[in-house]
Image: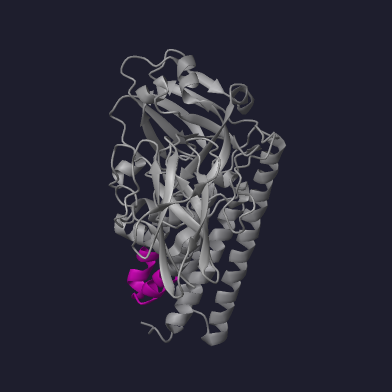
Amino acid sequence: MRTNRERGGAFGAAAIGVGALGVGELIAASRGDSLIDAIGRVMADTAPVPVVETTVALSGKHDKAVTRLGVGVGAVAAAVGLAALSDQARTPAVAAFGAAAAALGLRRPTRSPATVAGAAAAAGVLGLGLRSSPHGLFGALLWAGGGAGLLAGARALIHDYDRRQRDAIRRVGPLGGISMVPQDGLEDEPGLSSLITANRSFYVADVNLSPPRIDPTRWRLSVTGKVAHPLRLSLAELAADAVEFDAVMVCVHNRPGERRASNGRWYGVPLAKLLEHAIPETGATRLVTRAVDGYTISLPVEPLRSGAWPGYLVIGVNGEPLAAEHGFPARVFVPGLYGQYTGAKWLAELELTDDSHVDYWWKRGWPTDPIWVTPQARIDVATPGRAAASVAGVAWAPPHGVESVELRIDGGDWRPVDLGTELDSAAWRRWRTTVDLPAGEHTIQARAISRSGEVQDGTPRSPFPSGPTGFHTVTIKI
């Protein structure tokens, strides 16, 4: 029996792991898929909620990159662990490892033969590499360098597929449009968030590490289930009934002061109109929004049908089709609900069903009832001067709208600020003020109050399971 030293040691095994992962990723990428992303999706689907919440909190907008890094580290660690096994135990262990990875390609409704082939090839390379072992440091570096090169090549192939998807989306052409740039009277405030968030600056949050690629010429939205008139609609047919509306979309993980919120001019079909055409049958209590990869979120039918909840089947934002990462070709959006609960991106189907349906997030321990966005104010600018500070930011309280925004200094009394003109009650509202301050260090807090009378809750609370609360607090020195 060979020792670990004879096999090249832990470093050699790690290098073999990189090489095997590179082979598997390149084969999957030949069809635009990713073995790493398939494993990462499973991690997102199965990891305990505290692990997911901690990852989101620590990594912020880099959560996808962190997940991919975790997959890579896990693959290398697995190679080192397999190298430590005896020759007799290692072969079935490698086979089981490869079979588990290959099963990921069959797990999704979109099925990926390339991912299955990549997983099988990675397992084969891993087994052969551990059996022969790299010869010394130079051999290990060759394995690691070769694997890194293959991973870079795979990423280049995936980027090319992504470019083709962007080109296909651009060929769809404008969807809606901003005929006149909206203004609220606060355009001269440097550092203040835009009244309408640019498409390239919209926050991204979902469980997919990469968006599915969808051919807009072949895509159709199906409206099925407990309906008298099933529908099958193209983008052009949806656009014929679409309207524009202004609204802020907020992620359930958006803690006070964070940037997981964006304000847009959306273009979509009112869900009440779609339901009017489909005619829900008796017993249709849930509207299941289903993505092309099988991910589902459901909403109660009655408030959508009556218009009590102003929901939309969105196909564009700010005059353009939805970007791939934002749900092209369609997503559901109910202003006032957190993004996690407002519906799936990359829609394939709207199914009307009864209360027996179980959502993705329900299985993860989140509440079954949708969570509504609470009033929140964010400080974008706090510029100290000689004896004063200029403070500005944005606030939201959809769907009722922002009635007022207040500041307090060093825990004192709350004082009102000046508000910009409101675009819509579902949109965010910009604000600013100047406060006189003595020399020294000061803390500034902001809160929003909605037209319904709800005052922003200042008690800090983590996002799970009911959404975050607390005041955004900044410190300045005069």
Name which residue lies at 43% across and 38% down. 398
Magenta stretch: helix, strand or loop mostly? helix
In x, y percent, where is residue 95? 40, 61
Give the x, y percent position of residue 48.
Answer: 30, 56
In this rendering, the count of numbered labels is 0
Out of 244 and 370, give the one closest to the viewer. Answer: 244
Q: Is residue 81 left or right of residue 69?
A: left
Task: Let me know if residue 328 appears in the view.
Answer: no
Direction from residue 202 to residue 301 in the image, left or right: left
- The answer, for residue 300, to whether it is visible in the render is yes
Magenta extent: 76-94
Question: Could you say which is closer to the camera, residue 26 or residue 161?
Answer: 161
| Rendered view: 83 above or below 252 | below
Where 400 falls versus 59 (above or below)? above
Looking at this view, is 162 or 258 the one in front? 258
- Of 77 and 378, nearer the camera is 378
Q: Is residue 81 magenta?
A: yes
Q: Quadrant of the N terminus?
A: bottom left
Query: Residue 310: x percent and y percent?
Result: 45, 28
* Vertical relation: 417 (above or below) 72: above
Is residue 197 covered in magenta? no
What percent of the width, then of the height, locates residue 293? 47, 40
Q: How is the image coloured?
A: one colour
Residue drawn at 34 percent across, 61 percent down: 412
Report the residue at 30% width, 18% height from top: 283
